[in-house]
Image: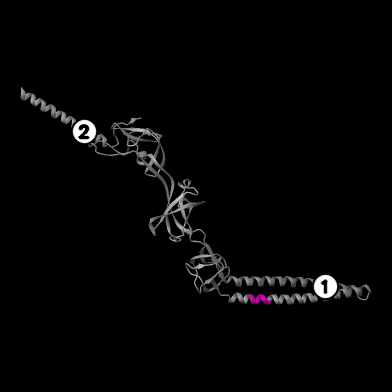
Amino acid sequence: MKKKRKIILIGALTLLILTGLSIFFLTSSKKSEFKTVKVQRGQIIQRVTATGNVNPVTTIIVGTRVSGTIVALYADYNSQVKKGQLIAQIDPTPFENELKQSEAEVLNSKAALFKAEVTLKDSERTFKRKQELFKRDLIARSELDDAETALNTAKAQYEIAKAQLKKAEAGLRQAQTNLGYTRIVSPVTGVVIAKNVEVGQTVAASFQTPTLFTIAPDLTKMQVDTNVDEADISKIKVGMEAEFTVDAYPERKFKGVVSQIRLSPTITQNVVTYNVVISFDNSQMMLKPGMTANVTFVVESKKDILKIPNAALRFKMPGSTPSKQQGVWVMRSGKPVRINIKTGVSDGEWSEVLEGDIKEGEEVIVDVGGTQKKGQSQSSPRPPVRF
């Protein structure tokens, strides 16, 4: 009798253990059907990134308005120049010859004008004498007419001579100006950042002004020209702070301010971007024109807020009915429950929770995963429970 009771007790105990193990494994299997992440409280910083180049705020292109051969250069790369300083010389010989020719033409025109003036005065005296003689009937009418014609011709020749003198004087001034253009001087005080000519090179200014030098007036005040995608341009505002790094100083962050958002778009292979200008102080002269800048705009920053992973917003429960309302799936009492929410700022990985029955520490589903029995479809989990 005692042996029979002992067998029954052992059987009951074994059954109890097996039942407990079954419940444990079943529960573990259900919990592992979903990958979850806990809802957290913390900070979200919304950023927009872009790339660009470091450039001087202003660059002055120095060219030439006359053609010729460069015979001397008085500035090079990185040269400090002052306004009015001679930085290059074009061979002046042809222009000096033109100037001498123009001076000779002026003298010739003055002599022609003097001659025309003398002729005009003589014609006036002759015409007056002919008038007196005609009044006394001492000459024929034809002689008076000839004298009048000669007078009018002399007047016309005098006016032509005056016009020729003005033209010659204008040519002289142009020759003087062209000779002056052979002296290339700096229009501003600054630094030469580009030189495009060498001694002996011939420059031609027939169709367009050739560039000889590029001068930056002030390299202590510079800017970054970035290209911001059209999807992000609405988030950028004038006066917004920006940070950027350059390859030369990868561990250092430089700060600037958005000074301009240019309206003219740049379209490359159907991608539309806008030039955003970031002004910054370069008084330490660390950054150089042309450096590539990786820019980060801090659009918005919020601290101590409830946030969920963006993967939870993208997750769709297999077999569930699609909903137009934004929401996430939360594990409650071992079951997935859909919660409608409203989100705020996002950094691309986490989003702020503005509205919704969700609390810090709760587990939101981000994916389907874990162990499953052979032959069981991953798209057929426990039927969802609506909230």
Residue behind mark 2? 24
The answer to which quarter of the image holds residue 361 is top left
User: Mark 2, mark 1: which one is toward the viewer?
Assistant: 2
Q: CA distance from mark 2 to mark 1?
A: 132 Å
- The answer to whether any part of residue 5 appears in the image is yes
Residue drawn at (63%, 75%), measured in percent from left and top? 98
Residue behind mark 1? 151
Residue drawn at (21%, 33%), measured in percent from left and top? 24
- Asked if residue 17 lies left or right of residue 282, the reply is left
Callout 1 secondary element:
helix
- Looking at the image, do the residues carrying marks 2 and 1 touch, with CB atoms under 8 Å apart? no
Q: Position of residue 68 (x, y in %)?
A: 55, 72
Q: Quadrant of the N terminus?
A: top left
Callout 2 secondary element:
helix
Q: Which residues are magenta?
A: 99-104
Q: Nearer the viewer, residue 219 or 182?
A: 219
Q: Nearer the viewer, residue 2 or 43?
A: 43
Image disc number at residue 37 = none
Circle 1: residue type? Leu
Q: Position of residue 316 (x, y in %)?
A: 35, 37
Furthest-top residue in view? 1
Q: Magenta stretch mostly in which secondary structure?
A: helix
Residue 82 belongs to the span the image colors magenta: no
Furthest-front residue in view? 284
